[in-house]
Amino acid sequence: MSGTSNGDPEANAGYLISDLIAMALEQLGQGAMGMNMDPQGMASGVMHLNMMLAQWQRRRWLVPNLIDLAFPSTGASVYYVGPDGDLDTPVRPANINAAYARLLNGAPLSSQGDFAPTDFSSADFATPEDGLGIGSQPIDYPLVLIQSYEDYASLSLKALRTWPNYAFYNPAFPQGEFRPWPIPPGGVWEFHLVFKQPLPADLKASSPLNLPPEYWDAIMWCLAARLAPSYGQEASPTIAAMAKSSLATIRTANTQIPILGMPSILTPINNPFYWPGLEIQKL
């Protein structure tokens, strides 16, 4: 089993959940100074930890990285994202941070967006003079995300089939709905969705916490603040300050600032980032 039960982190997996909960309860005077840990307190701590991580999942700056997953175009107008969907993920993402469509040009389908060093051979960079031809290099085209169902509903010709330029993601549950527009044909395109990597949310007391080291401190202090009312206490100023400081460290490590965009109402009609119905939006 990864991790340890004597308070030491394992190099790759970190502390056990039971270690972090025990340290959080010690800040509240529970289980300290050789006192026996209350089994119900440990079980409650595990539930609170899972609920806290589920809340953190919805905050971009509390998730360590984004992932890029792909699935092929079949010519459908709606693709499902989530368990057993067109893009099979353990849980459906609450939102999409970015999306692009890949014109395969004869390249093989992929399940990951990032290119590995072996993705391209010397033939991929050949010239016509080599007699090997060029044409197996995929080309990526960014998709502009339509941010609301109201804007997607304003599209007059939703069944338009041609080159994809936009996409709308509806975070339905348990499977989200990805709707490209215009709808591209199947077989020659591949959709790539970029979204927050799921944080663990089904941990047990014996599970290792497989998160970067800066999360260990944040989870311990935030969990102490969260558990304080269960023991008839208010989080002390020290606990609150340490929780705030540890979260600020994670924010510093995870912050990524994209290029600033213009409000849609200020976008001129002849701009490439225009779709029918954009002109009726209000700030």
Image (spheres, rainbow, N blue to C red):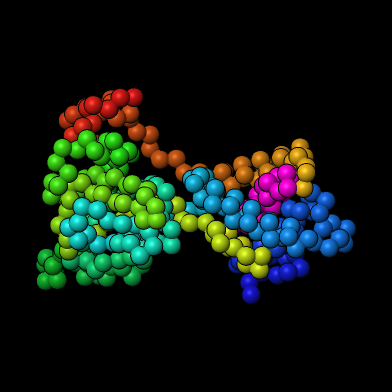
Q: Is residue 179 magenta?
A: no
> Is residue 114 at least partly visible in the picture?
no
The range drawn in magenta is 212-230
Q: Quadrant of the C terminus?
A: top left
Q: Residue at x 48, y 56 (%)?
A: 198
Q: Is residue 222 magenta?
A: yes
Position of 53 relative to 123 (above/below) = above
x, y percent for residue 48: 64, 53
**Location of residue 266 in the rendering, given as x and y in whole percent from the top left corner:** 28, 25
Residue 69, how many percent across, how many down? 36, 59
The relative height of residue 54 versus residue 259 in the rendered view (above or below) is below
Residue 255 coordinates in the image, percent (x, y): 51, 43
The residue drawn where x is 24% and y is 56% is 102
Residue most toward the right?
33
The residue nearer to you, when weighing 180 against 205, is 205
Q: Is residue 224 left or right of residue 118?
A: right
Task: Please name whichever residue, 165 or 92, is drawn nearer the observer in this view of the structure.
Answer: 92
- In the rendered image, which quarter contains the N terminus? bottom right
User: Which SS type dominates the magenta stretch?
Assistant: helix
Q: Residue at x 43, y 58 (%)?
A: 91
Using residue 281 as the reference point, say whether residue 158 is left or right of it: left
- Any part of residue 278 in sight: yes
Report the residue at 59% width, 50% height from top: 52
